[in-house]
Image (cartoon, rainbow, N blue to C red):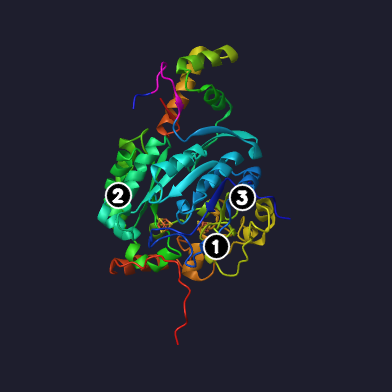
Amino acid sequence: MTPIGPATIPRFARGMRLREDQARSRWVVVGPERLFVPDEIALEILRLMDGTRSVDAIVDDLASRFDAPREAIANDVLALLRDLATKGVVTS
Amino acid sequence: MTPQPPPPLGLLAELTHRCPLRCPYCSNPVELSRASAELDAATWGRVFREAAALGVLQLHLSGGEPAARRDLPEIVAHAAEAGLYSNLITSGVLLDAERLSALAAAGLDHVQLSVQDAEAQSADRIGGMQGGHARKLRFAEHVHAAGLPLTLNAVVHRQNLDRLPELIELALTLGAGRLEVAHVQYYGWALRNRDALLPSRAQLDAATEAVIQARAAHQGRLVIDYVVPDYHAKRPKACMGGWGRSFIAVSPAGRALPCHAAESLPGFDFPNVRDRSLADIWLHSEAFQRYRGTDWMPEPCRSCDRREQDWGGCRCQAFALTGDAANTDPACAHSPHHHLLDLAVQEAAVAGTDFIYREIKRPAVAEG
Ligand code: SF4
Ligand code: SF4
C-alpha cells in the first residue's frame, strides 16, 4: 500500500460509513464490529473526504475556514488519515 | 431508582436455527427452534425500526444460517430502511451469485464468512458437511463480484489452531479486509465437545505469535481481531460489553436476550419481541435488569476496581462451570473456581478428537 501523501485522494475503505448517531448526538464511522468516534476536527476532515478531493484540496478547504497555519493543518490531516489507514478505515 | 442504561449499540438477529452445517461448537442453544416458530420478515422489520430508534447502529444477521430463509432479501431491505449497518454472518454454503447480488441490491453493507479450517478435508469434517469448504471459497468470489466488503471468521480450537498461519493466508487470498480469529467459547454445544476442542498452552502461544507477526506484515491490508481465550486467561472479558449495556440478541422465535447464549440460563423469563417493544424490554424487563451494572455482584467482584471494565465476565460461563450465573466468571484468577479451567485444559490434553455434532432434535418416542 502506498502511504497517504498530499496528492492522494483518500476515501473510506469498503464497508466503512460516516453517519449520524442521533441517539447519542454525535457522528460515527461504522464498520463491521467497529465504531470510531471522530472528534470535531477529525469530523471536519472526514466530511470533506468524498472520493474526489485530494488531501491537498481538503487542507485548502480547511485553511480557508479555520484560523490556523496551512502547514499545521496539513500535518494534522496527514497524521489522522495515515492513522485511519493503518486501522483499515481509510484507503487511497 | 436505578439509572437509565445507555442505549444499545448492536443487535444480533438470529433469523433461524436451521443450518446445513453441524459445527460441534455452534453457539446456538442445545434446544434448537423449528422453522414454524420463526418470526416473519415484517416483524423483523418492526424490531429493526425499534432498534434504530433506541440507538442501535449495527445489525448482525445471523443464525443458524440466515440464508436458510427464503425471505432474506426482504429482511435485509427492512434493515436498510431502518438505517442500520447490516452485517450478514454466514456459512456461505447456501448463497449463489444471484441470491447474493439480490442481498447487495437490498442494501446489505458487509459479509462475514465463517470457515472451519484452512484445509478442505479437515474443514469439512469439523463442519460436518462434505464439500462445504469448496463452496465457501466460491462464495467469497461472489462477495467480491457483488462489491461487498468481506470479513473472514475463523473459529479456532485444538484441531485447527496449528493452521492459523494458513488461515491468515486464506484471508489474504480471499481478499478479506478483516480476519476475526475467534476462540471457541465453552457453553452449549461447545461445552459438550470441550475435551475435543480445548487447545494447549503451547498451541496458543504459537498462535498469538503468528497473529503478532501477521498484523505487522499486513498492516493497512488486513485487520486481525484476536483475543486470548478464557481458559488461558487471568482476567475475564467484558462479555457483550456487560449484561444489558450495549447489546441485544433476538432468537429465531423472538426472545430478546442480553447475550445470544443466555437462553440456556435457568430461572429466566426472557421477554418476547412479539409481545413487547424493544425499548420496553431494554429499559424495563427484569431479564435485562438482573445482571446490569454492579449492584448484583458478589465478592470478589463487588470490591474489585475492574468491576466496571469487565462487569464480572460472562454469566453463561459462570453458570456452565459453577452452576450459578451470579458467580464471578471462573476465567478470573480471583474466582474461587478458577482452578476448574486448568483442570479442563489438563483433561483435554489427554482426550480424543471425536465430536458430538449439533443437530435439531427429532420428536422422540420415550424409551421404555
Ligand atoms: S456454527 Fe456452524 S452449525 Fe452453527 S450456525 Fe454457524 S455454520 Fe451453522
Ligand atoms: S474479580 Fe470480578 S471485577 Fe475483578 S477482575 Fe475478576 S471478574 Fe473482573
Question: Residue B271: x percent and y percent?
Answer: 64, 61
Dot 1 alpha-carbon crowd within 10 angstroms: few under 14, some 14 to 19, many 20 or more: few
User: Could you tell me which secondary element the residue under label 3 belongs to?
Assistant: helix
User: Could you tell me which secondary element the residue under label 1 belongs to?
Assistant: helix
**Amino acid bearing label 1:** Ser
Return the residue at label 1.
B36
Which residue occupies the foreground of this view, B137 or B348? B137
Question: Residue B204: x percent and y percent?
Answer: 32, 54
Q: Which corner quadrant holds the N terminus of chain A?
A: top left
Residue B134 is labelled as 2
How far separated are the C-alphas under marks 2 and 3? 34 Å
Do callouts 3 and 1 point to residues on the same chain?
yes
Task: Determine the chain carrying the residue at label 3.
Answer: B
Residue B42 is labelled as 3
Which residue occupies the foreground of this view, B270 or B82? B82
Q: Mark 2 near mark 3, Cβ–Cβ under 8 Å?
A: no
